Image (cartoon, rainbow, N blue to C red):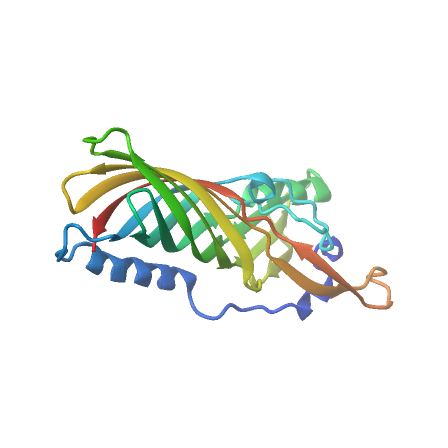
Amino acid sequence: MNSKVSNPSFTNLPVCCKGSLQKIVLAIVFLFSVVLFSKAQHTDSKLFAEVFTGPSFPAGKFGNKKFSGNPTENNPSGLAKPGISVNVSIGYHFNASFGTILLAGGSFNKQDPDSYEDYLNQTNGNNSRAVVNTNSWKTLKIMGGGFFSTPFSISSKLVFQSTITAGLCKTTIPEYSWVIYDQNGMLQSGFKQFKTPLPWAFCYQAGIELQYWLNKKVHVLFDMNYFNSNPGMNYFYNPNFPLPGPVIPAKKKYNLASFNIMPGIGIKL
C-alpha cells in the first residue's frame, strides 16, 4: 500500500532545516517592539516603523486540500489551513506621498490532516482507519519596495497607503506521519515523511493600509495584503518503481499564495 506514496527516491532529499523559523520571527518582533515603544526624538522625522500581525488565509494551490498521493506531482497542493502572519517594517518618506520600505516577516499555516486521511481511507477501503499527524508550513520573508500614502483630507488623521514589495522567502515542506489500523484496532502499517527545506525563492507582496494617527508620533493601522511565492526543488525518481530502473531528474514547485488581514501599530523614529 505504501509503495505508491513512500517512493524511496525521496530519501535523497534533505531532511532537516537549519535553525528555527519561529524563533527567528519572534526575535525580530521582540527587537522591533523595543524600538517601537522607545521614545521618538523627532516628531517630524521621515523615518517610521510598524509591526502588524493577523490571520493568514491560504489561496490557490497552497490552500487546496486534495492530496493526490503522487510523489512526482509537478505542482502539489499545500494542504494549508488558515494560520497567522507577522510583519515588521521600516519605511522612509521621500516626500508627503511617496517613500521606500523594508519589510521582514513570517507566517505559520498548519497542514490539514483530513486531506491525508481521506486519501488513505479511500486507498485502503472501509476495513481500515488512518490516523495522521501534521506540522505547519513556516515561511520567512525579507522584502523591499515602495509605497504611496495620502490623507483623506488636509486635516484628516486617517491616511490611506498602498505598498508593493519584492524579495526572497524561505520555507520548509512540513513533516507528517500516519498509521493505519484495521477494523479491530490492530496496527497494520505506518509512514513518516521528514520535513524538507526548500531553497530561497523570489516572493512579492502587495497591500493596502489604513492608518489612524493618534498623535504626531503614533498611529494604529489595518493592513490587507496578498503574498505569493513559488519555491521549487530538484529531485530524482525511478519511474519503474518498485522495479529497478534508471533514475530520472525532475523538479516540482510549491505555491505559497495567501491573503493576510493584519491590524498593528506604528511610530515615527
User: Where on the picture, by quarter, is residue 64?
Assistant: top right
**Where residue 30 appears, x then y in whole percent?**
26, 60
Residue 211 or 170: which is nearer the viewer? 211
In the image, residue 102 lies at what x, y percent?
Answer: 37, 56
Q: Which residue is most to the top?
A: 153
Q: Is residue 236 visible?
A: yes
User: Which quadrant holds residue 155?
Assistant: top left
Q: How many discs mark residues in the rendered view?
A: 0
Camera sees residue 82? no
User: Residue at 32% across / 42% down in the picture?
Assistant: 97
- Could you say which quadrant of the image residue 67 lies in? top right
**For the view shown, which residue lies furthest in the front direction?**
95
Name the foreground residue: 108 vs 199: 199
Please name the residue shown 48% across and 71% down the image. 18
Q: Is residue 184 above or below residue 178?
A: above
Question: Height in image: 244 above or below 83?
Answer: below
- Compared to residue 82, the image places residue 99 above or below, namely below
Q: Position of residue 103 (x, y in %)?
A: 38, 55
Quadrant showing the C terminus: bottom left
In percent of the image, x 14 and y 50: which residue is there?
A: 43
Q: Position of residue 189 (x, y in %)?
A: 66, 56
Lateral position of residue 41 relative to residue 127, left or right: left
**22 or 48: nearer the eye?**
48
Question: In the rendered image of this protein, does residue 90 appear above or below residue 96?
Answer: below
* Camera-nearest residue between 264 and 164: 164
